[in-house]
Image: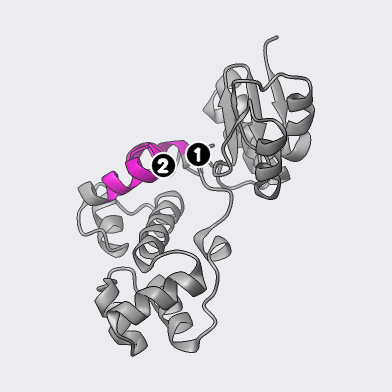
Amino acid sequence: MKRVVSVCTGTYLLAEAGLLDGRRATTHWESCDYLASRYPRIQVDPVPIFVRDGSISTSAGVTAGVDLAIALVEEDFGRAVAHEIARLLVVYVRRPGNQAQFSVQLSAQIARSDPLREVQYWAAANLASDLSVPAMAQRAGLSTRQFARAFAEQVGMTPGRYVDLIRLEAAQRMLTDTRDGVVRIARCCGYGTPEAMRLAFMRELDVSPTEYRRTCAKSSMLAPDPR
């Protein structure tokens, strides 16, 4: 068996056949909990867009199957061929498998109250600003304790976690969509230093910003600015 691949809920076919027992796998995020409960011998990971475990690969939604297919083409035929196929498919960025299935803005809830909602939008547009809990609480007109409690209740995550994720997401986008150097990106996204950004990438994605850019580069012609 050289290679077996599933797309979206096709993971269930591999699971039913016993091919995923003892392996790590994924599927569409809505089906991950059910997959894990029905097939407890599978290590279900709901976060990445695709997972490769030995000769078996599983992917999230249908578009994630395209990312997986292009990754396999790159492995077999090289980066140039993979980029050309991506261009023909109008897929401008080949996302790495460990990228999350959905963005922070899609996965996080939008706060019900206007002050918290405005803070969410403001934070996403001002990543280099002071986004500490006290600073955001002051902007919302609440005490630090009130703000932290209400934010977690309405958004579904703590303010600190929300800030971590929107900064990471913005840095990912800048690495793939611009020629800006890591120093500039770290500053624009509020990390301050490249090392702080590198630690965030390693913690969340298990890959450095430089490697992330190399993997996700739109084309071999997109060279990063050395500054």
The image's mark for residue 205 is 2
Decide: is 136 above or below 175.
below
Identify whether 109 is placed above or below 33: below
Q: Is residue 9 left or right of residue 90?
A: right
Estimate the spatial distance between the alpha carbons at disc 2 and disc 1, rounded to whole Å. Answer: 6 Å
Q: Looking at the image, tell me whether mark 2 or mark 1 is earlier in sequence order.
A: 1
Residue that mark 1 sits on: 98
Q: Residue at x 48, y 72 (%)?
A: 153
The residue most toward the bottom is: 141
- Percent position (x, y) of residue 34? 71, 42
| Residue 31 visible in the picture | yes
Disc sitting over residue 153 in the figure: none
- Amino acid on which disc 2 is placed: Leu
- What residue is at 79 percent from the left and 28 percent from the top? 13
Closest to the observer, 13 or 77? 13
Specify the principal SS of the magenta part.
Answer: helix
Which stretch is magenta? 197-215
**Label 2: how many residues lie within 10 Å, few (<14), some (14-19) or many (20+)?**
some
Contact (CB < 8 A) between labels 2 and 1? yes
- Left or right of 98? Residue 140 is left
* Coordinates of residue 103 in the picture (x, y in percent): 54, 58
Question: Camera-side residue: 186 or 116?
Answer: 116
Please tell me whether residue 210 belongs to the stretch shown in magenta. yes
